[in-house]
Image: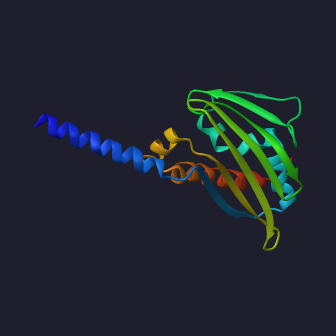
Amino acid sequence: MIKTIALVLLAAIALLLAYAATRPDTFRVERSRVIPAPPERVYGLIQDLRQFNTWNPYERKDPAAKGQYSATTTGPGARYAWQGDKVGTGSMEIVDATAPARVAMKLDFVAPFEAHNQVEFTLKPEGAGGTRVTWAMQGPVPYLAKIAHLFFNMDRMVGQDFEDGLTNLQAVAQKPAA
């Protein structure tokens, strides 16, 4: 009886591992929102990493995290690294910026897991003075991550953070400029 149960468990694990191998090699999470502010205003809040962190949902999740900015904080080459108990350890760097339409970043995580992803913000004028902001992240999914993705919905988890971030961005963008 125990032998039969062990064989069934082994077969189930083998099927699960085989199924994980068939999952996609990349992922993409994307959220979008119309923010009632001009593209130039919204762009400034994304391409300046100090401004970015005033609405960044991950900074708000772990206010005790320690962060360090590079010598430049705006545009291509601007870099920010962090280390925190809740948000782990990593860095982001702006690799491309086209005012006021696009900001692309390289996002590298070291802990609690290693990951190297691409982030892109696109901004398009919409309506009377509004901006459609799309926040997207994509990257590779190594085999162990494929197994984890069977149990955790990456789109739902990260997507909720993106939605929160876009809500925060809207609130900051609508404040009167200081």
Color style of the picture: rainbow
Q: As drawn, which residue projects farthest toward the bottom? A: 127
Instruction: Say which of 100 and 30 sits in front.
Output: 30
Q: Residue at x 64, y 44 (%)?
A: 57
The N terminus sits in image quarter:
top left
Residue 94: percent from the left, percent from the top?
81, 42
Q: Which image quarter: residue 17?
A: top left
Q: Residue at x 65, y 26 (%)?
A: 83
Camera-side residue: 97 or 22? 22
Taking depth in this image into account, of 81 and 4 the one nearest to the observer is: 4
* Coordinates of residue 173 in the picture (x, y in percent): 77, 54
Q: Is residue 68 visible?
A: yes
Residue in view at x 84 percent, y 55 percent: 41
Q: Residue at x 33, y 42 (%)?
A: 13
**In the depicted view, which residue is nearer to us: 156 or 40?**
156
Q: Within the image, what quadrant is residue 121 found in?
A: bottom right
Q: Position of residue 65 (x, y in %)?
A: 64, 28
